[in-house]
Amino acid sequence: MKSKFEKKTALVTGTAGFIGFYIARKLLSKGWKIIGIDSMSEYYDVLLKRRRESILLQSPNYKSVHAKLEDKDVILDLLSNEKPDLVIHLAAQAGVRYSIENPRIYLESNVSGTFELLEAARAYPPTHLLIASTSSAYGASDKMPYKEIDNSDHQISLYAATKKSIENISHSYSHLFGLPTTIFRFFTVYGPWGRPDMALFKFTKSILQNEKIDVYNYGKMKRDFTYIDDLVESVFRLIDCIPETKNEKNKEFAKFDSISSVAPYRIVNIGNSKPIELMQFIRTIEKFVGKKAKLNMMPLQAGDITATYADNKLLEKLTGYTPKTTVDIGIKKFVDWYRNYYQL
Ligand SMILES: NC(=O)c1ccc[n+]([C@@H]2O[C@H](COP(=O)([O-])OP(=O)(O)OC[C@H]3O[C@@H](n4cnc5c(N)ncnc54)[C@H](O)[C@@H]3O)[C@@H](O)[C@H]2O)c1
């Protein structure tokens, strides 16, 4: 069968970031040409971003552009010159807690940035547009596991609200301009080269330095931790699952498919579907670091949700794949990487 991606050229946003780096690396290994765009924002250690990028730049098929998505001329020029047949949008201002401190950047990067990308995609439509959203979009919902077709109207942080807005704006563009669009809702992604603002990185660093770690909601939290390799495999397989406007073919998925009735648009959870208690997570880090953590028990932080749990049926039906790495394996890989990266 002829591939729908004859050019094999992809624009990937956020390629100096944790997930973007891995997705770009996977696509390069499969013979894709990648244009990676990243603003190299200073939200966390820029050296880590440069080091990820330097690995991508070892490939002659990788082209790096440092710009903000909100720079509309840059984005429009890129799409007009390269006409990528695939766009994977991962750049964002992430983080629930920081969105209380600095809300404006979330509207700029996430809402305006995505809007400019959609405008460019409208002018030069790719075969498939894939956009990152988050499990935080489920917000106050306590109906577990989270299903894509369940209500998700009550976000409790600005970060989540900007992500939900992106989902809605993308739906309207998909409907108006026939843009085949897949939204991923990622569930707490972790692994080597991960984000320094996330629990695994912060806990490992503090335990090694004999510093206290902040344990929110007195440890009564559950997260559906998703190992990066599983997430990459899921995203890679979803590239070929190009949504079509709801029709007879979708009938077999009808009970749980989130496909829109009026647009080639679908939302897909990517999570491990096995929530882990925060205290179990901490004990596993202690095991591989070889040291006990000093705990600073804290109340629930504003904007945080106490549990996340992905229903993975749709991902499995579409791709035949479901994430499977246990935290025991994933945390060990992270701690090994951390020691090696910081030469400890
Ligand atoms: N890591 C997770 O657990 C997780 C969970 C749910 C959703 N997500 C989503 O997945 C995507 C990737 O997350 P990540 O963990 O790799 O985050 P990351 O912060 O490591 O990567 C995001 C990258 O985007 C860049 N960026 C930020 N604003 C930009 C802008 N306006 N223009 C261009 N570049 C910009 C940053 O410099 C950064 O390198 C994000 O959309 C995030 O919201 C991540």
Image (tube, grey):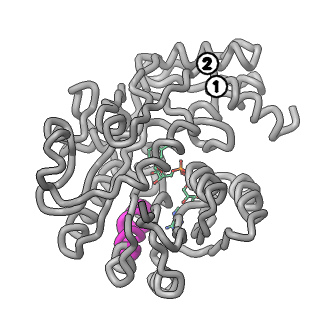
- Residue 231 magenta-drawn? no
Q: Which residue type does callout 1 highlight?
A: Ile
| Residue at (19, 37) in percent of width and height | 256
As drawn, the label of residue 35 is none
Mark 1 residue's CB less than 8 Å from ligand 1: no
| Residue at (52, 74) in percent of width and height | 7
Between 161 and 18, the one nearer to me in the picture: 18
- Is residue 238 in view from this perspective? yes
As drawn, the label of residue 331 is 1
Tally of marks: 2
Please report contact status of discs 2 and 1: CB closer than 8 Å, yes or no. yes
Mark 2 residue element: helix
Mark 1 residue element: helix
Q: Position of residue 132 (x, y in %)?
A: 41, 53
Q: Which residue type does callout 2 highlight?
A: Asp
On screen, 324 above or below 136?
Answer: above
- To which residue does mark 2 refer? 328
Query: Magenta span covers which residues?
Result: 105-117
- Is residue 43 in view from this perspective? no
On screen, 35 above or below 342?
Answer: below
| Residue at (71, 55) in percent of width and height | 52
The image quadrant where one finds the N terminus is: bottom left
Q: Main secondary structure of the magenta part?
A: helix
Q: Position of residue 196 (x, y in %)?
A: 64, 42
- In the picture provided, is 47 more to the left or to the right than 25? right
Name the outermost residue toward the front: 1
